[in-house]
Image: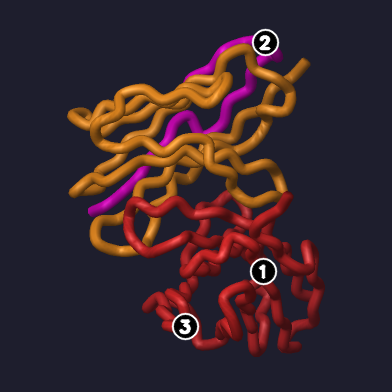
Chain colours: A orange, B red
């Protein structure tokens, strides 16, 4: 069964600290993996899209890694800011369709 | 500037009273999607348009309909909203179909049912 699982479900950190969010997927065949940031009451915004051949991709303070062998991805946030408080969603397209499989997200709260 | 625009941002309707949510895009993308997202849950695809071709998900209730009068606009009609339809409704677009196409989301319309 095609699934995307994320951990932790929620995370609280202090401003300025780093954190890492995890995503495991069982989708096959694999095409790409996407990380989205969703602020409360807003739509998801794309952070990165990683294909099979990419191991690491950065977008500012966000760095995503992908291990296609173990079917794991991580999103590392460096020097967190209050504005990083949001849900982070890992998304993998199902093969041969237009459907996206969404993880249930990690809710990150950054406190001063 | 917002490229996928949803109006209104908040909508309140009465139980059983038809309601229409709208989505417009300035990206000239071929594909437009409607998702339902309930609190603390992942978005659930309701249907999508590839150009004028309507593609309904098998488990989308008949109560939900959609119209796409032109490339830029897509509407979600809920014919008889029930309490369980209270949710955030997200519109998304992609330039084409396929697993490699990124989707661009609007900020959603939060629907409340009285």
Circle 2 is placed at which residue position? A16
Chain bearing mark 3 = B
Q: Callout 1: helix, strand or loop? A: strand
| Callout count | 3
Q: Is residue A46 above or below residue B34?
A: above
Q: Which residues are magenta?
A: A1-20
Residue under numbered circle 1: B24
Q: 10 Å neighbourhood of mark 3: few (<14), some, or many (≥20)?
A: some
Chain for mark 2?
A: A
Q: Are labels 3 and 1 on one chain? A: yes
Q: Residue at x 30, y 55 (%)?
A: A94
Q: CA distance from mark 1 to mark 2?
A: 38 Å
**Which label's residue is closer to the chain start, 3 or 1?**
1
Query: Does A17 appear in magenta?
Result: yes
Same-chain status of marks 1 and 2: no
Q: Secondary structure at mark 3?
A: loop
Image disc number at residue A38: none
* Residue B60 lies in the magenta stretch: no
Tell me the mark number nearer the camera, choosing from 1 and 2: 1
Q: Is residue A83 left or right of residue B53?
A: right
Dot 2 falls on a residue whose secondary structure is: loop
Give the residue drawn at x 61%, y 29%: A108
Q: Quadrant of the C terminus of chain B?
A: bottom right
Position of A41 relative to A111 (above/below)? below
Q: Which residue does the numbered mark 3 point to in the structure image?
A: B52
Residue A21, position as x, y percentages in the image? 47, 26
Q: Are marks 3 and 1 in contact (CB under 8 Å)?
A: no
């Amino acid at each position: 069964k095609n699934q995307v699982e994320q951990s932790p479900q929620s995370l609280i950190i202090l401003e300025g600290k780093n954190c890492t969010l995890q995503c495991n997927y069982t989708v096959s065949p694999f095409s790409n993996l996407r990380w989205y940031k969703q602020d409360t009451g807003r739509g998801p915004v794309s952070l990165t899209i990683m294909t099979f051949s990419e191991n690491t991709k950065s977008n500012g303070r966000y760095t995503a890694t992908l291990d296609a062998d173990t079917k794991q991805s991580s999103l590392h946030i460096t020097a967190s800011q209050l504005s990083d408080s949001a849900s982070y969603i890992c998304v993998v397209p199902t093969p041969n369709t237009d459907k996206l499989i969404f993880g249930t997200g990690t809710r990150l709260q950054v406190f001063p | 500037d917002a490229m996928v625009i949803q109006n209104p941002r908040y909508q309140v309707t009465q139980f059983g009273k038809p309601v229409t949510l709208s989505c417009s895009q300035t990206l000239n993308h071929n594909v437009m999607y409607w998702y339902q997202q309930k609190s603390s849950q992942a978005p659930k695809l309701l249907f999508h348009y590839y150009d004028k071709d309507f593609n309904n998900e098998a488990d989308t209730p008949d109560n939900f309909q959609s119209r796409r009068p032109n490339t830029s606009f897509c509407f979600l009609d809920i014919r008889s909203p029930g309490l369980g339809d209270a949710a955030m409704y997200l519109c998304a677009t992609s330039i084409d179909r396929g697993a490699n196409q990124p989707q661009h989301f609007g900020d959603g319309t939060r629907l409340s049912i009285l």
